[in-house]
Image (tube, rainbow, N blue to C red):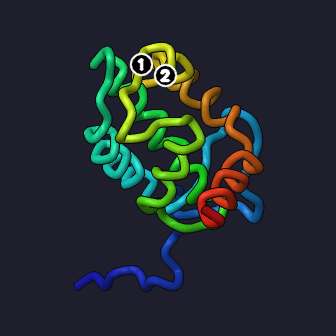
Amino acid sequence: MSIATAEISRAKKVGLQRSAQLATGSGLGTQAPGEGFAMSIAHRQVAKLDFEHDHDRHDVEVGLGLVAAKRASLVGRGPQLSDVVVAMKLFGLEPERRVEHHDVTAFAGLAHSYVAQRRFVDAVSKEDLLAVHAEATHS
């Protein structure tokens, strides 16, 4: 009869090994738990918006989800509704106002290009996200 290898001497799974320092820099993304949940929240919030051209909806949804995930990762937590709301405020998107095509040109093509997504998220600075947050909490 064979006995299973003890957990203590079992080789670590490659995907679970972590380096002492996280890689940071342009194009590397953000590390936060449950980043995919930001996309679900963004999907629900974008559904409340009225678009001039409906084909802009998916690009905006992806962009807001990515920015919300970045904001959540800054403090090392999963995304929340407030992260998506801050992302919407940052880009001037409000449910009461119709979203014109020229308002969302920054989001163009995000749904179909990983390179464009990374470039878009890298362009949003930590200071921008914190400034919008401070403004929202003082209103």
Q: Residue at label 2?
A: 104
Residue appearing at x 49%, y 22% in the figure: 104
In the displayed structure image, the side of residue 39 where residue 74 appears, left or right: right
Residue appearing at x 56%, y 21% in the figure: 106
Residue 22 percent location from the top left of the image: 72, 56
Note whether 124 is above or below 52 in the view shown: below
- Please state, as top left, top right, bottom left or bottom right, where the C terminus lies in the image: bottom right
Mark 1 Cα-neighbour bin, 10 Å: few <14, some 14–19, many ≥20:
some
- Please state, as top left, top right, bottom left or bottom right, where the N terminus lies in the image: bottom left
Residue 44 percent location from the top left of the image: 28, 47
In the displayed structure image, the side of residue 95 where residue 135 appears, left or right: right
CB under 8 Å between callouts 2 and 1? yes
Mark 2 Cα-neighbour bin, 10 Å: few <14, some 14–19, many ≥20:
some
Residue 42 percent location from the top left of the image: 37, 45
CA distance for labels 2 and 1: 7 Å
Dividing the picture into quadrants, the one containing residue 55 is top left
SS for tag 2?
helix
SS for tag 1?
loop
Dividing the picture into quadrants, the one containing residue 71 is bottom right
Residue 36 percent location from the top left of the image: 39, 50
Q: Residue at label 1?
A: 100
Callout 2, which amino acid?
Val
Viewer-closest of 17 and 78: 78
